[in-house]
Amino acid sequence: MSLKSLLNPLLAPFQFRSFPPARSGWNRIQTVRISPGAATKEQLIRQYARDLRFPSWSGENWDSFEESLRSFGSSVQENGSRPLKVRIWHGGCPLANAPADLMTYCEILHDLVTIPHDSGIRFEVLFRKSDRDVMNQLLQEMPG
């Protein structure tokens, strides 16, 4: 049995790496870098809002966060083009002290990666390899 089969299914579409991805000079990749200090839902959503320039109506709740991510595909970059990929790199396990929020966050990211978007934008979610077991344990401990 492979390690991947032991992972919580929510984590299956995510990549776990030892090093962050190299900065892309290609302007069609939009990178969001989530700092290790994202301990609350509000802090996490603010990082996305800053990096992806969420609309002013966007709030700091999960429904608004998901809607803002889904509507991001219709936004246009400063150079007039839309990104083809959004790469989300986590510098640490977010929401480690809030497992219920971590579960909701992973569900949203899982859907972003696995469900095609009308805009054609692909989402790529990356975490540090060292956080895989921590996240898996937190998610496994959540009630069914």
Image (cartoon, helix red, strand yellow):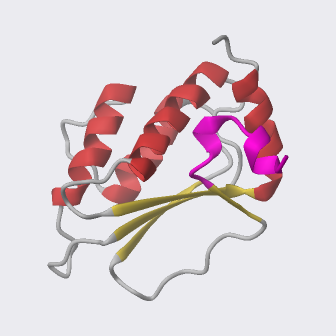
Residue at 34% across / 83% down in the picture?
27
Return the residue nearer the eye: 53 or 70: 70
In the rendered image, the residue lying farthest to the front is 1
Determine whether, in the image, residue 95 is placed left or right of residue 68: right
Where residue 97 sits, quadrant-wise, is: top right
In the rendered image, the residue lying farthest to the bottom is 25
Determine whether, in the image, residue 60 is placed left or right of residue 9: left
Indicate whether 8 appears above or below 28: above
Residue at 17% across / 68% down in the picture?
76
Residue at 76% across / 19% down in the picture?
141
Q: Is residue 137 visible?
A: yes
Return the residue nearer the eye: 22 or 135: 135
Q: Is residue 61 visible?
A: no
Return the residue nearer the eye: 4 or 58: 4
Determine whether, in the image, residue 18 is placed left or right of residue 84: right
Q: Position of residue 14 (x, y in %)?
A: 60, 53
The quarter in which the C terminus is drawn is top right
Span shown in magenta: 1-14
Q: Position of residue 98 (x, y in %)?
A: 65, 23
Residue at 41% across / 41% down in the picture?
111
Q: Position of residue 131 (x, y in %)?
A: 77, 47
Q: Residue 9 colored magenta? A: yes
How many marks on residues? 0
Q: Position of residue 68 (x, y in %)?
A: 27, 43
Return the residue nearer the eye: 93 or 122: 122
Determine whether, in the image, residue 131 is placed left or right of residue 102: right
Q: Residue 42 colored magenta? A: no
Indicate whether 25 appears above or below 95: below
In the rendered image, the residue lying farthest to the top is 143
